[in-house]
Amino acid sequence: MKRLLNCTSSEMVNMTKEELKQSILACEGRTVMTETVVAIPPLLGDLTNAELAVSFGSDMVLLNVFDCNNPQIMGLPETNEPIKLLKKLIGRPVGCNLEPIDEDAKMMESRQKISSGRHATKETFIKAKELGFDFICLTGNPGTGVSNASIEKAIQLAKEYFGGMIIAGKMHSSGIDEELVDLVSIERFIDAGADIILMPAVYTVPGLSEEEVRNACKLIKSKGALSLSSIGTSQEGSDEATIREIALVNKRCGIDIQHIGDAGWCGIALPENIMALSIAIRGKRWTYHKMASSINR
């Protein structure tokens, strides 16, 4: 099994779930995931934000606000198979957010309603599989009301109906006041079938310490899962020095995948911040290699 660092586009898009997971593990904390919004005009107009993200060094692309019942990606040529076409254009594993809404949870803010095609349900898991997604991310956008309990239930359902890699966890509160890095919940997520545990990056949410994330990473690794730190607090639109500091402290914690969110401009992080994150965790050599490698390899 080759490291994701060394893989060509054709190798990456044809990996099984198990191969992709092992390939990420072998990179030793040098994997970049970029999240992009697909429901608004992209930054470059006639190119998808996913294409832009990959051109600046991203290894994996996570689609936000993707509706499995209305599978549209702004900037993508008209097609009946949007995910297959996108993977052909970028040569990278592609996933989407699906949100396990907890209708009974006590909210800290007004609840934001989302379409049924964005909910984490049996029907959307089946559609995500049919569309060709490599992974799904069970998490919550701001104010939608996703809880740790609802994520656990969704993992069990996704394990049965999706079949690809499952990412689970919260980037921020999603409108519910509860622990974001909770070791008990993490263990339950993995036992339910999660392959990757998502948590906020150190320096992105108030009060989250390096020690807490390090301890979570140790638990996750001991149970055979991978860890993902997320910049999901609009700091993807901050300066490059901030991105570098976040990247290095989370690598020191033991994070396997570093995610950068979509709130820069037009549904994508500032492109130079994607590159800054990549350079910080793996240097210019591998960053330029990713940027220059042809999708036809």
Image: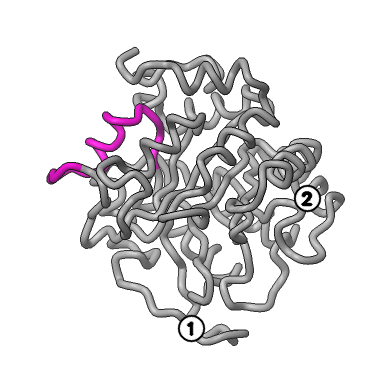
| Label 2 CA crowd tier, 10 Å (few <14, some 14–19, many 20+) | many
Residue at mark 2? 213
**Quarter-wise, where is residue 171 in the image?**
bottom right
Q: Position of residue 91 (x, y in %)?
A: 35, 27
Is 187 or 84 nearer to us in this picture?
Answer: 84
State whether residue 269 appears in this view: yes
| Label 1 CA crowd tier, 10 Å (few <14, some 14–19, many 20+) | some
Is 119 or 193 nearer to us in this picture?
Answer: 119
Left or right of 25? Residue 292 is left
Q: Residue at x 36, y 36 (%)?
A: 51
Q: Secondary structure at mark 2?
A: helix
Mark 1 vs 2: CB contact within 8 A: no
Of callouts 1 and 2, the N-terminal one:
1
Report, in whole angstroms, how far the alpha carbon at label 1 lies from the one at label 2.
28 Å
Q: Position of residue 247 (x, y in %)?
A: 71, 40
Q: Magenta stretch: give its range.
A: 77-94
Q: Residue at x 54, y 19 (%)?
A: 288
| Screen quadrant of the C terminus | top left
Report the number of numbered marks. Answer: 2
Residue at mark 1? 111
Where 281 falls versus 42 (above or below)?
A: above
Does the stretch in magenta take in 85?
yes
Q: Position of residue 52 (x, y in %)?
A: 40, 37
The type of residue carrying mark 2 is: Val
